[in-house]
Amino acid sequence: MTEPRRPLPIGAFPLPFGFLLLPADPGLEPIREGLLAGRLPETWPPALRAHELALAGEDEAALRELTGDDAVSRFNRFVLDPDSVEPEELRSALGERFSGLVDLVAFAVGRTDVVPEAAGLTGELAAMALAAQAVAALAADDSAGAVSRLELAIEAAAPVSAALTGVLHGAIAQAHKHGGAPAAAIEHLTAGIGLLTGTDLTLGCAELHVELGATYQELAAERPELLHRAVHHYHCALQLVTKERAPELYAAAHANLGTAYLTMPMVEASDQLRLGVAIGSLRAALSVYDRDTHPRQWSSVQLNLANALVYAPSAHRGDNLVEAVELYEALLAVRDRDRDPLGRARVLANQGNALAHLGMFDHARGKLVEARFIFEEFHEYDAVTSVRGLLDEMARTAAKADADA
């Protein structure tokens, strides 16, 4: 066969498009070079109609375009429909230099658990095999093994594909975080963002921004100044994605952004404005997160939004408090006494506080007393003291109102 031109522009873009081979046609050289750099063609030539359809997610239509019997067409059919081609025959058709691609695709799509070998491979092929080995290492909870393989993968990919190298920097950052090395993760995420910025891998770049922001946010417990860096990267991500194109990533960026703003210390009066921005972001996240489809994320964002509404400066404070009470009530429906007693107690305490601000002392007292009982049962004495303080304050306020009356 006429072999595809190396290096192959594979691995940087998502499956299945990211594994499709280009025909060996000199006229496609500019496109191949662009893909290696993470750039898509402005116009797709007829010879790559299947690639264009696959990128758009129209796999069945792409398959119908691949009618040739040459090795590249057969391999691309295998990528789009791994059950439609016999792997052994395909290995033979591709030849020894490219037969490892079959193993890479079979592993990537879950058709086999056999991890591809990297021995004898170079460049992007070695990088992809090593990345597959790193995936297997992480699945076995071997962070160090994953890091070592990805370091070799980056070394192999760097001379041939900037786009693939950027993606691999993101992968090794995950391995470093899994192994408890956030500083190394930050270094690789920053490198990955540098390589993917300005490319057509906008979703991949946005993912790295969110991951870098989350890493800074995790470290902010000891270094609060890092929250500003986290916020910057969430904003960068939101400039690259929309709710329609990447709803989960959009929601994660907004949820983290809202939480970061709520965590920042309020030093000046103008800082209160951040609460309004946080509320907007949390509402945006809840436009994606649903109680049934994303229960964990929904619960966390719902609670943060309710807490923000209680303390947000607003001309409609009463409306905010009523909404907060309703949000807390929805949370109580999923935080029952048996499965999550302390989580339920915290929601009850917050809801009781909001009800007290509304002057609904009888309702607030019932919520706070239930919260206090749970906190006492689990020896959460600081929380008990806080709830008792609220109850005492309510009693004093009620007594004063009676005296004035």
Image: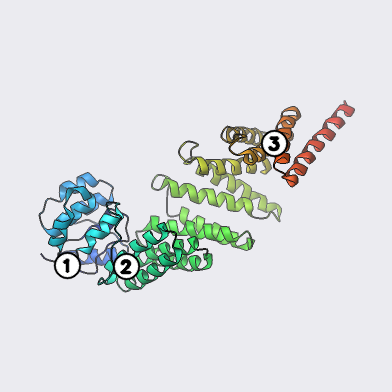
Q: Residue at x 52, y 66 (%)?
A: 181
Give the secondary structure at mark 1.
Answer: loop
In the rendered image, the vertical position of residue 84 relative to residue 34, given as above or below: above
The residue that label 2 is drawn on is 127
**Circles 3 and 1 in contact, beta carbons < 8 Å:** no
The residue that label 3 is drawn on is 354
Q: Quadrant of residue 371?
A: top right
Locate the C terminus by quadrant.
top right
Q: Amino acid at mark 3?
A: Ala
The residue that label 1 is drawn on is 96
Judge from the rendering whether residue 345 lies leftward or rightward of residue 390; answer left or right.
Answer: left
Residue 231 image position (x, y, % from top left)? 55, 57
Of mark 2 and mark 1, the one earlier in the sequence is 1
Residue 164 image position (x, y, % from top left)? 33, 65
Q: Residue at x 47, y 59 (%)?
A: 209
In this view of the protein, which residue sits in the foreground, 278 or 347?
A: 347
Give the secondary structure at mark 2.
Answer: helix
Q: Amino acid at mark 2?
A: Ala
Q: Amino acid at mark 1?
A: Glu
Residue 106 image position (x, y, % from top left)? 26, 55
Mark 2 or 3: the one toward you: 2
**Circles 2 and 3 in contact, beta carbons < 8 Å:** no
Q: Residue at x 72, y 28 (%)?
A: 363
Q: Residue at x 85, y 35 (%)?
A: 396
Query: Local crowd at mark 3 within 10 Å, few (<14), some, or many (≥20)?
Result: many
Of mark 3 and mark 1, the one earlier in the sequence is 1
In this view of the protein, which residue sits in the foreground, 22 or 116?
A: 116
Query: Local crowd at mark 1 within 10 Å, few (<14), some, or many (≥20)?
Result: few
Residue 335 visible to an observer of this rendering: yes
What is the spatial separation of the Cα atoms under label 2 and label 3, in whole angstroms?
55 Å
